[in-house]
Amino acid sequence: MPRIAVVFTGGTIAMRQSGAGNVPTLRGEDLLASVPGLAEVAEVEPIDWGLVPASHLTFAQVLEIGRLLAETLARADIDGAVVVQGTDVIEETAFAWDLLPMPLPAKPVVVVGAMRSASQEGYDGPENLRNAVAVAADAAMAHLGVVVAMAGEIHGADDVRKTHTHAYATFQSPNAGRLGLVADGRVTLLRRRMPVRLSRIPTEAALPVHVLSVVLDAQPALSDAPAGLVVTAAGGGNTPPAYLELARPLIVGGVPVVLTTRCPSGRVMPGYAFPGGSSEWWEAGALFSGTLDVLKARVLVALAVGAGASAQELADLVRPFGGGRAG
């Protein structure tokens, strides 16, 4: 029987109604007791890390959990891990852990939450948790990187997005599609992926990494000197000229500047040569993010720079996603 470590961090899955709304109250043992048939799937080792709403998580906490995962997965008696958390920032946290090097041999890591609290009708926590443990117990998932298992679907951390505020099937992979399905303790793989990993787990994230989004008739500004900048361009990578002029000194000074798109899928590419167009960004030396959206691009810059990655190493990290930089 596989032995799976389950790290409980809080989130809606651990909440009950109290006063004006939901608050985190359920510890690991409480959640595990709510899952029928779990003992038939795997032996579970609960780890109560905390009761933190996902929107409160920090990079420091995400790295703390990442180091906990690395230490736990290094144990010979552990076959996989599940992180239970709130859904608000799963697309960021899952990708952060996906970037961190984990011990060999590789073991599955699954992130899961719920869209309803334990006080609400249609509470999806028990089924999601049972499915997540089943995914973590499947040895075929070991080399696919960190995945998100929600609503019976499995999504790769590099592409998964939260697309609806309250729908059960909120998590989608708009570029590559879902990795697989899970139901009744069985996993069905639909495709495979290879994770992109940093050379080491950083001691801390490089911050701040600012985000500038293109919106109609806006004037971009930076309040301080950033460790990195992500520009969310319109369409295939186009901005008003002022955005590029703001970014040029940073690029020249060696600060990573990443160009991505505000579109829900696709990637930025050279092709528009007007001032502020995608070709001008390419020629200026901006790093094109490929299919990584603004949230994941920011995570990548913060952790990669924190790990001491060079400009070339950053370019190598985005290349598997269809990104890169000139030269």
Image (cartoon, rainbow, N blue to C red):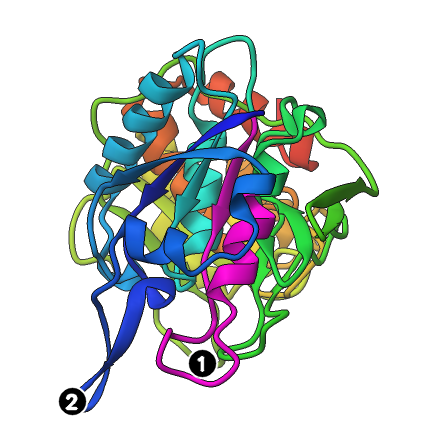
Q: Looking at the image, which residue is at 49% across and 80% down? A: 216
Q: Which residue is mark 2?
A: 19
Q: Is residue 123 magenta?
A: yes
Q: Secondary structure at mark 2?
A: loop
Q: Is residue 289 visible?
A: no
For the point 58% across and 25% down, which residue is it?
1
Where is residue 148 shown, x and y percent of the image?
A: 56, 48
Per the rendering, the mark at residue 256 is none
User: Nearer the observer, disc 1 or disc 2?
Assistant: 2
Q: Badge 1 is on which residue?
A: 217
User: Which quadrant: the C terminus?
Assistant: top right
Q: Is 31 in front, or is 148?
A: 31
For the record, the magenta segment spans 108-133
Residue 269 versus residue 264 in the image, above or below = above
Instruction: Judge the density around disc 1: few (<14), some (14-19), many (≥20) Cα neighbours within 10 Å.
Output: few
With 156 as the anchor, is 63 left or right in this view?
left
Would residue 188 be found to the left or right of residue 102 on screen? right
Image point (39%, 12%), residue name: 75
Q: Nearer the viewer, residue 168 or 128?
A: 128
Can you name the residue that lies furthest to the right here? 190
Say what amino acid the circle numbered 2 marks. Answer: Gly
